[in-house]
Image: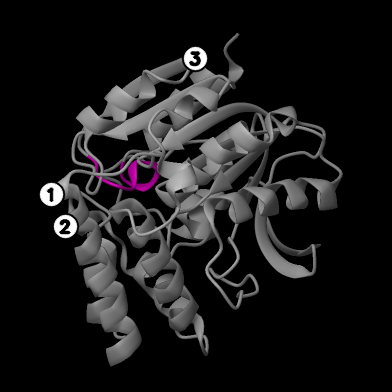
Amino acid sequence: MSTPTASDTTTSIWLDLLGSGAGERFYDVGGVRTRVIEAGSPELPALVLIHGTGGHAETYCRNMGPLSEHFRVLALDLPGHGFTDRPATAPTVADHAAHIVGLLDALGIERAHVSGESLGGMVAAWCGIAHPERFDKVVMNTGTLARPDAAGQAQLDDLEQRTLALRDNGVTREGTRHRMNWLVADPSRMTDEMVEVRMRVYSQPGMLDSVAMIMSWVVGMLRGDHGEEFMAPGVLKRLERPTLVLWTEDNPGQTTELAERVSQDIPDHRFEVLTDCAHWPQFERPDVFNQTHLDFLLGA
């Protein structure tokens, strides 16, 4: 299956998934109706893909096809996101990790690889820390368990404000694109289709209340308001699964220098930096993102 490149303007979500056998399904995970986009044979090793705060499974539309040639790929909407049920209170990183384990239980999957972006990267790390018996390899993509510097925190605060503006002023195409442009190095790469998907997700009654609640919890954790157990110095020493830390030169919120420094705590890790992309390398540089994943996950 061919993989779109950063400059490919002809692709669409359906064209990206065409031929992969991808399908949208809903599963009961501990009483939470959970949406999953699946691709690949159930006989293949499982790979769980976890989006970031305010995201949804379509985050990985450019990756599921190529990855599904080797894995049973499961891209889910986390609780409070996409079309999964919304919780009354903001889930913690540990809550999300436990939900991933619950999804594996619901599908009868004993072990899986896990790859997450932004908040999803933090959740992927916690999956490996708290549930090492259920996960083989871990990929942390533009999100790690470490507090940012002042400049990075300001960037995260800006994203929170863009989210709150949508909640308070209504879901508009301009406001949605303004939020999503934060994710990419080149705004021209954020397609109208992806903006429309996000608008439809956010237009569900009460959805932006949920997204804003979770966003405020995550930004507060990174700022130091709560969640000390997830941000404690040296916490990544507990991550004993083989781990790829995949970063970008232009990642907002947490710098390359920070990510490389804290990654040294991971006993078995590889650190790689992608160029010409920001917070969504899986969307901006799917060609190299997919190949890097395959090299790591299929390697010895």
C-alpha span from label 1 to label 2: 5 Å
Residue 198 drawn at (x, y percent): 42, 72
Membership of 99 in magenta stretch: no
Callout 1: 10 Å neighbours few (<14), some, many (20+)? few
Q: Answer whether labels 1 and 2 touch (C-beta < 8 Å).
A: yes
* Magenta span of residues: 277-284
The C terminus lies in quadrant: top right
User: Can I make out residue 200 in this image?
Assistant: no
Q: Quadrant of residue 259?
A: top left
User: Can I make out residue 161 in this image?
Assistant: yes
Q: Residue furthest left?
A: 151
Residue at which label 2 appears: 154
The N terminus lies in quadrant: top right
Name the residue at 21% across, 37% down: 255
Asked if residue 64 is positioned above or below residue 204 in the image, the reply reads: above
Residue 135 drawn at (x, y percent): 68, 31
Name the residue at 24% across, 43% down: 251
Q: Secondary structure at mark 1?
A: helix
Amino acid type for the residue under numbered disc 3 = Pro
Residue 169 drawn at (x, y percent): 27, 91
Q: Residue furthest top?
A: 300
Residue at which label 3 appears: 267
User: Is residue 266 or residue 78 the one in the foreground?
Assistant: 266
User: Is residue 232 or residue 287 the one in the foreground?
Assistant: 232
Amino acid type for the residue under numbered disc 2 = Ala
Residue at which label 1 appears: 151
